[in-house]
Amino acid sequence: DTGVSQDPRHKITKRGQNVTFRCDPISEHNRLYWYRQTLGQGPEFLTYFQNEAQLEKSRLLSDRFSAERPKGSFSTLEIQRTEQGDSAMYLCASSLMARGAPYEQYFGPGTRLTVT
Amino acid sequence: AQSVTQLDSHVSVSEGTPVLLRCNYSSSYSPSLFWYVQHPNKGLQLLLKYTSAATLVKGINGFEAEFKKSETSFHLTKPSAHMSDAAEYFCVVPLDMRFGAGTRLTVKP
């Protein structure tokens, strides 16, 4: 399988619990992105990595959110003390960035989080 | 920072008629621009991309878009809509990872 994969596909959690999502990018891609998408809205950028370095975080990303990409391969996104407002689809994408050119992002199927 | 504005949140066309989905960008220079499509319960897929080469860009499924610097636009078109085109379409500035709000395309039989 050469696509972007995400695990789990669905997560239901109670308010206040911590959750962690995993993303496995396309193997040769050096960039990895996390987005959040709510119903009827476009994907909202959260953060991205180039190799293992986290280069940018959205101001919308509260301190309860943390992301890692320890070996420059897979990434995890953790949400601590979840709130109902965190309910959304969390999308991961990867791309190849070379010579400053923006190559297309390949998206995974997403993890749908429901906070009850 | 660059940004995009998708001028219509919803477009409805009849099958076999032309499709026009509008996107304007704001930038002090010519940006790269992409269009993505998201079918219900499916992942986002790249339709086409403009990266400062030819201003008329052809994509998958018969879609194309024309970059017009004078109008700061990158509208998506298709000559004849098909039922399978019903989806959400997003105009994107890839360098800033910014998506437009999306345009929902409905195709009536």
Image: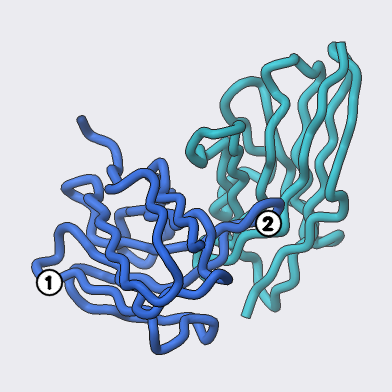
Chain colours: A blue, B cyan
| Whole-percent x, y for residue B83 in the image | 74, 15
Query: Toward which corner of the image does residue A102 lie, by quadrant?
Result: bottom left
Q: Are marks 2 and 1 on the same chain?
A: yes
Residue at mark 1: chain: A
In the foreground, B13 or B53: B13
> Would you say A9 lies left or right of B79 here?
left
Residue at horizontal 39 percent and vertical 46 percent from the top: A10
Residue at horizontal 24 percent and vertical 65 percent from the top: A76
In the foreground, A86 or B101: A86
| Whole-percent x, y for residue B23 in the image | 78, 53
Of callouts 2 and 1, which one flags the residue occurring earlier in the amino acid sequence?
2
Residue at disc 1, secondary structure: loop
Residue annotated with mark 1: A70
Q: What quarter of the picture does the N terminus of chain B occupy?
A: bottom right
Is residue A13 positioned above or below B28 on the image? above
Residue at horizontal 68 percent and vertical 56 percent from the top: A41
| Whole-percent x, y for residue A18 in the image | 31, 72
Residue annotated with mark 2: A41
Residue at mark 2: chain: A
Query: Toward which corner of the image does residue B37 lie, by quadrant?
Result: top right
